[in-house]
Image (cartoon, rainbow, N blue to C red):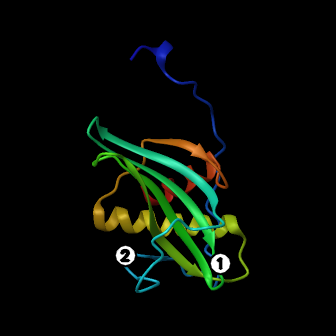
Amino acid sequence: MSPELLPRQKLNEVVTVPELPKGLAPKVEWVEPLLRDPPRASPRKLTFLFSVEWSWSPMHHRIDNYYLNPRRTGWLLWNNWVNDGTAPWSWHWLLMAHCKKGKFDEKTIAIHLIKALWECEQEHQMLDQYHWINNTGLLDVEEIQAIAREIW
């Protein structure tokens, strides 16, 4: 690819991940399930966190769209992904991580749920660092990069 075709680049401030607050205990769903029968329908009252993409080859890729969902008893981290392996393509919601309610702000909860998820996937599934950030929401580029630096 020629330099003229590359997307515009920008410098981002280097920030650190906030300390894990006492009492906040993020859990990855496939390691420590929250519910025997998790919700199957689209969750309600969602906060979009960000979207990242891995692209290992034209036929081997992954796009994760993370959402935070407050519940009466705690917080749920969801991934909304497209199943492009069947026709017609369809969108799916997958519960990824969770934690109990506490006196923590939404951003801190989101950061530590994502961090716990990625650490677990890196350890057990050999997940490498995402290749790019598609969209930002509650978490900005600097915060997403800070989480990644702690893992990879």
User: Measured from the top left, where is residue 110 in percent x and y?
Assistant: 61, 65
Q: Check disc 2 and report its element: helix, strand or loop.
A: loop
Dot 2 or dot 1: first in sequence order is 1
The residue at the point 73 percent across, 81 percent down is 103
Amino acid under disc 1: Pro
The residue at the point 56 percent across, 73 percent down is 76
Do residues under tags 2 and 1 come within 8 Å of each other at their CB atoms?
A: no
Amino acid under disc 2: Trp
Query: Mark 2 = which residue?
Result: 30
The residue at the point 63 percent across, 34 percent down is 11
* Cα–Cα span, label 2 and label 1: 23 Å
Q: Residues within 10 Å of mark 1 (few under 14, many from 20)?
A: few
Relative to 146, does residue 34 appear above or below in the rendering? Answer: below
Image quadrant where residue 22 sits:
bottom right
- In the picture, the quarter occupied by the N terminus is top left
In the image, 77 versus 132, the foreground residue is 77
Relative to 2, does residue 119 appear above or below in the rendering? Answer: below
In the image, 18 versus 113, the foreground residue is 113
Q: Check disc 1 and report its element: helix, strand or loop.
A: loop
Relative to 106, does residue 91 appear above or below in the rendering? Answer: above
Query: Mark 1 = which residue?
Result: 21
User: Measured from the top left, where is residue 2 in percent x and y?
Assistant: 42, 13
Q: Residues within 10 Å of mark 2 (few under 14, many from 20)?
A: few
The answer to whether 30 appears left or right of 13 in the picture is left
The answer to whether 93 appears left or right of 110 in the picture is left
Relative to 62, does residue 111 appear above or below in the rendering? Answer: below
